[in-house]
Amino acid sequence: MAEYKMESLKTFNYDRPVIEKGYANQTLCIDISDFVISIKPVTEKTKNIFIGGKGFDLWLLWNAVNSTTKWRDPENAICIASGPMGGTPVYPGSGKSIVTTISPLTGSVIDSNVGGYFGPYLKFSGFDALEVTGKTSKDVVIFIDGIDEKVQVFTAPGLPDDSYNLSAMLTERFAKGKPRNISVVSTGPGAKNTLMGCLNFTWYDLKRKRARYKQAGRGGIGSVFADKGIKAIVARWDTVKVKTNNPADPNSLKGVGKKYSREIVELDPKQNQMAKIGTTHLVSIMNDFDLLPVNNFQYGRHPEAENIGQEVYRRIFDPGYDGCWMGCTLACAHGVKDFVPITGPYKGTKVFVDGPEYETIAGCGSNLGIFDPHTAIEMNFYCDTYGLDTISVGTATAFAMECFEMGLINETDTGGMNLSFGNRLSALKIVHQMARGEGFGQIVGRGIREMKSIFAKDFGADPDLMQDIGMEAKGLEFSEYISKESLAQQGGYGLALKGPQHDEAWLIFLDMVHNFMPTFEQKAEALHWFPMFRTWFGLCGLCKLPWNDVVPEDNKETDEPAKVMKHVEWYAEYYSAVTGRQIHPDGLIRMSEAVYNFQRIFNLKMGFGQREHDNIPYRAVGPVKTVEYESRHERYDKQLIEKHKVDIAGKSTEEKVALLRKFREELYEKLKDAVYKRRGWNNNGIPTVETVKRLGIDFPEVLELLRAYGVE
Amino acid sequence: MMIRVNGKKHSWHEGMTIKDILKDLSDSHLYAVVRINDKHVSRPHFEKTPVPDNSEVFLIPMIAGG
Ligand code: SF4
């Protein structure tokens, strides 16, 4: 291990408050420009409107930045919060943190939901949320010690850059013999040299005796962290029990938690076996339904997809308990032991890799035309250790590869690299270049939006074509599902507040496979309910997976099986038991609506958040090229004939591509109309005054902002 | 000559496919994916996927995605 020194720059002592019904009732604010540390109270009003987690983060960030703030500006804040239920050990999936900042990729608010112990440890140390502003040139480590009731800022020259080593060293350094008491948030050199940096949040694996990590991946939060000069933030807390979170009704909490845990233990082995294979089962399922992204989202299946599917990873994953929070019986956070990379600084060394999950396998595998499970693992390992988001890395590289194959860029532009689909070594080389901030990888690390303008300006590439095939919206790279054949999922991506990430709405199966929502109104209803309910998890410190990745056996007899209402009712019980506020399932949606609309208005404050910003590239809507059309010509021909009443006799594929495009783009615009109406927004996608009043977010600055956009 | 479907005994015959199992169910349209022992099989393959004798078959109620 590297030699390093730790020098304290600031120590701040405080009295830890008693946690009351899931809240510490205060926020920790650190300005690292001059090491000013302060504590702000959390008011009842803030709790009523913003609930916790993402809600608290957004409120802190809203007050920290102004409408002209850019991601590198010192006033940009990184906010981290769990939520009132965060840190409950008896209810599966209760250890999440939400992180927000102004994103380098989108220029607006980004939020990312992450496992690991940090959020709960922060709260039990006395803080519902952490806000870090300012910038320093010193490479600092922030230590929040809930046991000794102090916050310290250190410089630590000599600490390694990469997250893999750094997390392990800082865990050891602060553990005082109890490494499970530590959670480290850190990033790596890739975050410093790109706009797609992630944050790694650790949890300590007692059996394997190592710090494991999960990622707050999306939107370049790690790049903001690195730019601020933060090396790591460490939280220390003691043993966690139910009473640590001081719930209002511990018996009722234990009752509902036990039901849920038991159900998972009984049903997960009969259903998706996530405790054994994580989300890797999705690879073959997506492939079978023509939904697995292949070669930059051109195709939805590939004959070699089995090579990167669950059967292979089942053998590769190290068996054992893999819960990223204590007591999660779904325990899906698997890893690979003794993996030996074939490239980069860890070449030939045995490492432990956290992952891969479906998104990484699809993004850094099939979407790059790579069907080798070890390349996906190696990409996963280096992205994590360099602090890079595997989704943005995968999708951005896929775009560069298609540009290369189409001759929009050539080997001179890539610095001599052959970037054809399937080229494993080039894909890995790009990741290493990103970490060093050099070569063509440095350009890919700017993200697709910037790549499009660089390729057009410097390499003479066709901007219209790149607009169609560059899979980004709002500046964020798409996550890894083909949305072409599901209008509802096009909305799920395009109308998501932060950009095209599926965590707001994953409706492909319900829409395309089950055809549960044939009308616009039904799609709009789904694009209201699902984003709202999924938002709720992020307000409370919860993981969404246990809600609908395991479902009760009688679920199919319920009116709306997709909502898994039995679980929604248990969540309402759980919320009531922790906070003491009695709530009905509908009340959960209402809570989220306030925060959701506030985030939309936050986008508006930053100059976005209108109809034009909900546009998506045509590749997400339909076939751009004739080869894509031909790969599904039966489906497309049938649609043109039956749905759009077109006589296709004698029409060339180019003509059919153009016709289909016209129809599909119109449908997407109609979907926007229907969703805006359902959400209580005007035709430009802005919440109306009536909506903000109904939700209690009609603050003077909100009304003033709406007025500036003609909404009165 | 028997399999288990969602834990319940179910007769088996030579050449049986997943489609054959679902044929007897009133709610078969709900299942887009089933599992035979450890292997997930999706609807496009129901017709041609044989179910071996002694298999454990699980009807997966829903695929929730990411
Ligand atoms: S389901 Fe998986 S991601 Fe969610 S809390 Fe449990 S282990 Fe973590």
Image (cartoon, coloured by chain):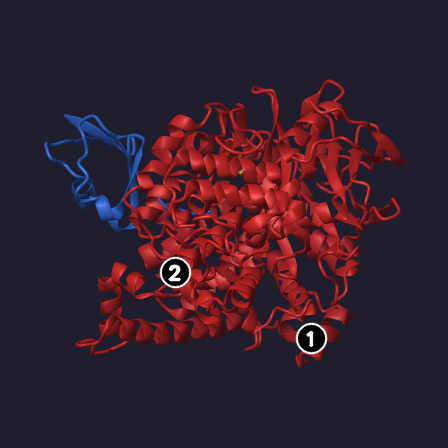
Report the residue marked by disc 1: A706
Whether pointer 1 and pointer 2 mark residues with C-beta atoms closer than 8 Å, the reply is no
Residue A222, can we see it?
no
Q: Quadrant of the C terminus of chain A?
A: bottom right
Chain letter, blue:
B
Q: Earlier in the sequence, mark 1 or mark 2?
A: 2
Answer yes or no: disc 2 within 8 Å of ligand 1: no
Percent position (x, y) of residue A223? Answer: 67, 49
Between residues A667 and A381, which one lies in front from this camera angle?
A381
Percent position (x, y) of residue A130? Answer: 76, 45
- Mark 2 burial class by Cα count in 10 Å: few <14, some 14-19, many 20+: few
Position of B36 compared to A144: left or right?
A: left
| Chain letter, disc 2 residue | A
Q: Residue at x 43, y 48 (%)?
A: A418
The residue under label 2 is which amino acid type?
Met
- Whether A343 is drawn above or below B46: the answer is above
- Whether A51 is drawn above or below A204: the answer is below
- Give the residue furthest to the left: B14
Residue A511 image-quadrant placement: bottom left
| Colour applied to chain A | red
- Mark 1 burial class by Cα count in 10 Å: few <14, some 14-19, many 20+: many
Asked which secondary structure carries label 1, the reply is helix
Between residues A524 and A61, which one lies in front from this camera angle?
A61
Position of A102 compared to A610: left or right?
A: right
Report the residue marked by disc 2: A406
Percent position (x, y) of residue A680? Answer: 57, 71
Q: Residue at x 65, y 65 (%)?
A: A603
